[in-house]
Image (spheres, rainbow, N blue to C red):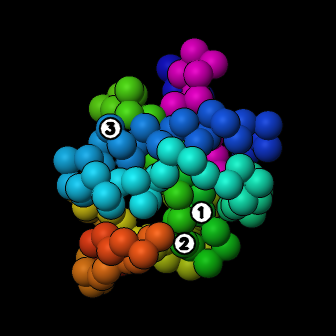
Amino acid sequence: MIRITQYKHDYYDELREVFFTAIHQVANHHYNSQQLHAWAPVNYDKPSWAKRLDSIKPFMAFIDNKLVGYADVQKDGYIDHFFVHGDYQQLGIAKALMNKIIESSVNSKPLYSHVSLSAYDFFKAQGFIEINTQQATINAIQLTNFLMQKI
């Protein structure tokens, strides 16, 4: 059973594990090694990571007390982070997180996100449309992603 909770700041390391495995185990089908390491380097600035999480306050998804995914939505409808642990794919976690985002943003502006190649089909299945294809630069490396908005 998937349990979605509000953000708690003492999960920094577990959230980083979700982020890292989602990129290196799932996005590796769409991006090369250089792009993956630019996006989610092995070595990272822990205080900056903690500050980022504190600012976006993502929902957290648990299965049997294991943190397996997280996602946020900002007041303007922007979904900044949306990640499911690489070892917990295809279990309904992403759908549960998206449902929580939709439920929590009923009075918000339209939902939108910069969606990776690996998340494109999921977002499309959730009613998002592609606004445009773009090149994001992360740590001086370019990655293709898509601006998508929920219709």
From the image, state whether disc 3 or disc 1 is nearer to you: 3
Reading the image, the residue beneath label 3 is 25
The disc placed on residue 78 is 2
Label 1 vs 2, first from the N-terminus: 1
Q: Is residue 63 rendered magenta in the image?
A: yes
> In the rendered structure, are the residues bearing label 3 and label 1 in contact, judged by CB atoms less than 8 Å apart?
no
Q: Residue 4: x percent and y percent? A: 61, 36
| Mark with earlier residue (3, 2) | 3
Amino acid at dot 2 = Tyr
The quadrant holding residue 13 is top right
Relative side of 18 to 131, left or right: right
The percent coordinates of residue 73 (x first, y second) are: 59, 63
Task: Tell me the residue at 67%/55% (across/down).
Answer: 45
Give the structural element (helix, strand or loop) at label 2.
strand
Pick the front one: 86 or 106? 86
Pointer 1 with pointer 2, Cβ within 8 A: yes
Q: Which residue is mark 1?
A: 73
> In front: mark 3 or mark 2?
3
Residue 63 to residue 48: above or below: above
Indicate the secondary structure of the residue bearing disc 1.
Answer: loop
Image spot of residue 96 (x, y percent): 47, 40
Magenta range: 57-69
- The amino acid pointed to by label 1 is Val
Q: Quadrant of the C terminus?
A: bottom left
